[in-house]
Amino acid sequence: MIRTLLGVLGDEYAPAMRRTVILMTITAVAEGLSYALLVPLLRALLGGTPADAVPWLAAFGAGVALYAVLRYISDLSGMRVGTTMLRGMYHRLGGHLARLPLGWYDADRIGEVSVLAGRGLLQAMGVAAHLLAPFVSALVTPVTIVAVMTAFDWRMGLAASLAAPVVAAIQAWTARATAAADAGRHERDTEAAGRVIEYLQAQPVLRTGGRTGERFRLLDDSLREAQRASRRTVLATLPGAVGLTLTVQAIFTGLLVLGAYLALGGHIGAAELLVILVLAARCADPLLSLADIGGKLRAARSELARLETVLRTEPLPEPAEPIRPAHHGLEFDAVTFRHGGRTVLDKVSLTVPEGQRLAVVGPSGAGKTTLLRLPARFYDVDGGAVRVGGVDVRAIAAEELMARIAIVFQDVYLFDGTIEDNVRLGRPGATEAEVRAAAAAARLDEVIERLPGGWAANVGEGGALLSGGERQRVSIARALLKDAPIVLLDEVTSALDPVNEAAVHEGVERLMAGRTVVMVAHRMRTVQRADRVIFLDGGRIAETGGHDELLGRGGRYAGFWNIATAPAARDRAGTFVQDRSPAARAQSPHD
């Protein structure tokens, strides 16, 4: 367990952890040895001159005081090491998550990462602070006590030592029996956490549908499953706990019978028998605590294994000798990308010259969003290459690549802070005048003027205090402030009201001016502003050319255009008009 913990954290924590374990071991030995002083103490008390017990009583008191000091120091050391490791683990996990591919963060990760970064991390890193000392004591103190018992009477010591293999076997059996239950419980807890987040995010939909008085079935089911999984874990642990208790009690009873037999036969004195029984009783307490400590350690080990799995997830490889792109054109060279057992993009080849706009259209699930994300290395391709300025994106330093790209997607996430804080994410070192100019270009200044607090207005978690159109204006202002030469743009107006749509369109036009643009278009009028259009279907380019050229061909694009722009089609929900709700995007992440 300790080796795994240090393997996850790194060798820099090994010396402090090693010192803490040694100190806790010395403390546990001191506790066991202090009980050895009870033999001469009780022998003197039960002898002819009880006054002879005073020095031994003083020695016993000194031994207990020494143990108390050592226990305080070792517990304090454990707490310090635990908090240091927790802080280091948060830094390491945060740094690692920041280097993972952006495509790694799909919907399934929400519950998993939230549980791991919260309770899971505290449980795993709390071993040094809360579990290590009692665990060491539960192992070392009984061994020391058995050694003391053996020194006074080998028969009693031998009988007590018989408990060791039995206790070890019970612990091993319990660990095997609860492994599956622990894994199932974690899976159910993760699912329940995801459902709770989903339930909170779905409040607008539930309330709009008039379902506020109903129970949310998916959440209820996941919570019931989590309850059943917890019950299975308890039931799996129960036989081991009962077996350990019965074993310890049986050993103690056996020692009592053996001690009485030896005392009646004159082989040991009454004082020695009394002390040995006291030692046996004191030995039983830490052994009985092994059931509880073992369960907590198994849970911590499971969380540590999951943490190790995340930390072993390969981040995007950085080039040993990064190459700086010569220009800002884009090229997709026979790009193949697979995900979830299916081919999302199949040998797609196209170029976007610097300063030109490419519109990507096609039915849902065609791979449009995946194509849009590849230049920013959300994923690395399985075949072919994506190039920026003639350089494979895998040969460009991540910081250099992201400095050249501005991304505006439909799902805008704003941090819980002020509007200015969120705009400045585009370029934290920008001057106040530059921030104001970007806001004006995105027509965000109109929003700021009517909000209480203006620039200091809080947007809430995820931007919940702003409307969808207002969040999009913040996103566009952020991209304008970044002033990147390449823009990746997902159609951002498909769910906006006319006023916000006009404002956002104006901001988008300013954002695209003079830049290399790849945009996924869901509204056909957006396509008309592109220099080139590709019709993507089934991960392949079905048609490519200018808007007018493709209409003249009368092919797939022309049919798509006619249906999408027909008034009757706009009135019918669903025909070629893509569902861009969060639920639909979750079902089709590579649209």
Image (cartoon, rainbow, N blue to C red):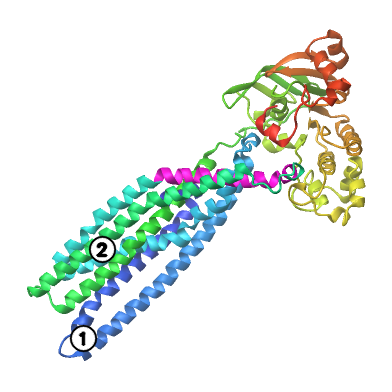
Can see residue 205?
Answer: yes
Residue 216, picture quadrant: top right
Q: Earlier in the sequence, mark 2 or mark 1?
A: 1
Q: Is residue 201 magenta?
A: yes
**Residues at marks 2 and 1, CA–CA distance in whole angstroms:** 29 Å
> x and y percent of residue 474 in the render?
83, 43
Question: Tag 2: residue type?
Answer: Gln
**Disc 2, SS:** helix
Disc 2 marks which residue?
249
**Left or right of 264, for residue 305:** right
Residue furthest out toward the left: 265
Q: Residue at x 66, y 45 (%)?
A: 199
> x and y percent of residue 94 in the render?
61, 48
Q: Residue at x 77, y 43 (%)?
A: 208
Q: Of 26 and 215, which appears nearest the observer?
A: 215
- Note whether 193 is above or below 43 in the view shown: above
**Disc 1, SS:** helix
The magenta-colored residue range is: 179-206
Prevalent SS, magenta region: helix
Can see residue 113?
Answer: no
Q: Residue at x 56, y 44 (%)?
A: 222
**Left or right of 429, for residue 383:** left
Q: Residues within 10 Å of mark 2 (few under 14, many from 20)?
A: some
Question: Tag 1: residue type?
Answer: Leu
> x and y percent of residue 186 in the render?
50, 45
Disc ID at residue 45: 1
Residue 340, picture quadrant: top right
Disc ID at residue 425: none
**Left or right of 293, for residue 314:** right
- Note whether 35 is above or below 229 in the view shown: below
> x and y percent of residue 480 in the render?
84, 39
- Which is more foreground, mark 2 or mark 1? 2
